Image (cartoon, rainbow, N blue to C red):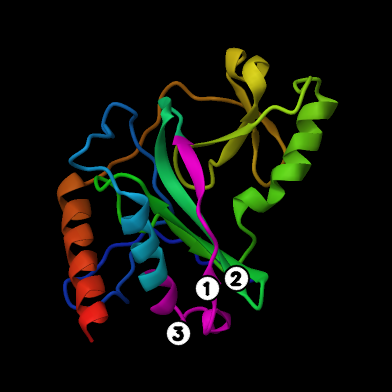
Amino acid sequence: MKKLKLFLVLALVTVACISPVTGCQFFSDKVVLTDENRVSQSESDAAALYWMNNSISYIPSWEGAELSAPVIYRYVADATQAIAYEYTVLKNGESAGHIIVPACKDLQPVLEFSDGNAPSSYMESARQHAVEKGYITDNEEPLILYWGATTYSVQFGNEMEKNRVAIHLPTGMLENIPRQMYTQIDKTEARASWDNLEQLIASNMID
């Protein structure tokens, strides 16, 4: 199965220029969500739609597809905050891939995209793992945590939160929640990419 989980760097001229670096991880103290850098859901919706429509040369099956409503990923450093939006790409009502857009403009406009299954599609199997491990005592709501590439994990209930553990999507493995995230991020480059993407979206709407 073709995988395209790529860290996006928007070129000033074309959206087709992508860095080969996969994913994105970051120090928790370097990503601070504020009203000024926050990505609204409407902005995220527009970014994901534009990216889907301009990725058909990479993923032909996305031609004529549409996006699901987003699944919200929470920031591992502050679970009250959204850190990313996951969209399932739907073709004739069936999953044809997914796109993950950050909720912070200090991160590149698209964190990951793939023609494979969306991480959230493994939610029920993760819930079963949590039941088997004795963490679920009632119908606890899931909390998807994100701290970088392929690190989408889900917690169910207070017991998992207290023990700082989560179940990794899609492997089902129980893992410890890290207290420190790391990698280099370039906020200036990310903001420039967002500005460029917003101009492309606006231009596309006018056309």
Q: Where residue 17 sits: x, y (%)? A: 29, 73
Q: Which mark is residue 57?
A: 3
Q: Amino acid at mark 3?
A: Ser
Q: In the structure shown, which secondary structural element does the residue marked by tag 1 occupy?
A: strand
Specify the quadrant of the image occupied by residue 101.
bottom left
Q: Quadrant of the C terminus?
A: bottom left
Towards the viewer: 46 or 154: 46
Q: Residue furthest top?
A: 162
Vertical placement of residue 109 versus 123, above or below: below
**Contact, mark 1 vs mark 2 (Cβ under 8 Å):** yes
| Helix, strand or loop at mark 2 | strand
In the rendered image, the vertical position of residue 102 relative to residue 76, given as above or below: below
The residue carrying pointer 1 sits among few (fewer than 14), some (14 to 19) or many (20 or more) residues within 10 Å by Cα, namely some
Question: How dense is the environment of label 2, judged by Cα within 10 Å: few (below 14), some, or many (20 and up)?
Answer: some
The tally of labels here is 3
Q: Is residue 171 visible?
A: no
Distance of label 3 from label 2 (alpha carbons): 17 Å
157 lies left or right of 72 = right
Highlighted magenta segment, given as a residue range: 51-74
Name the residue: 47% across, 82% down. Answer: 56
According to the picture, the residue beneath numbered tag 1 turns out to be 66
Residue 29, located in which quarter of the rendered image?
top left
Which is nearer the eye, 143 or 69?
Answer: 69
Identify the amino acid type marked 2.
Answer: Leu
192 sits left or right of 173 in the view: left
Q: Which residue is mark 2?
A: 90
| Amino acid on which disc 1 is placed | Glu
The earlier-in-sequence mark between 3 and 2 is 3
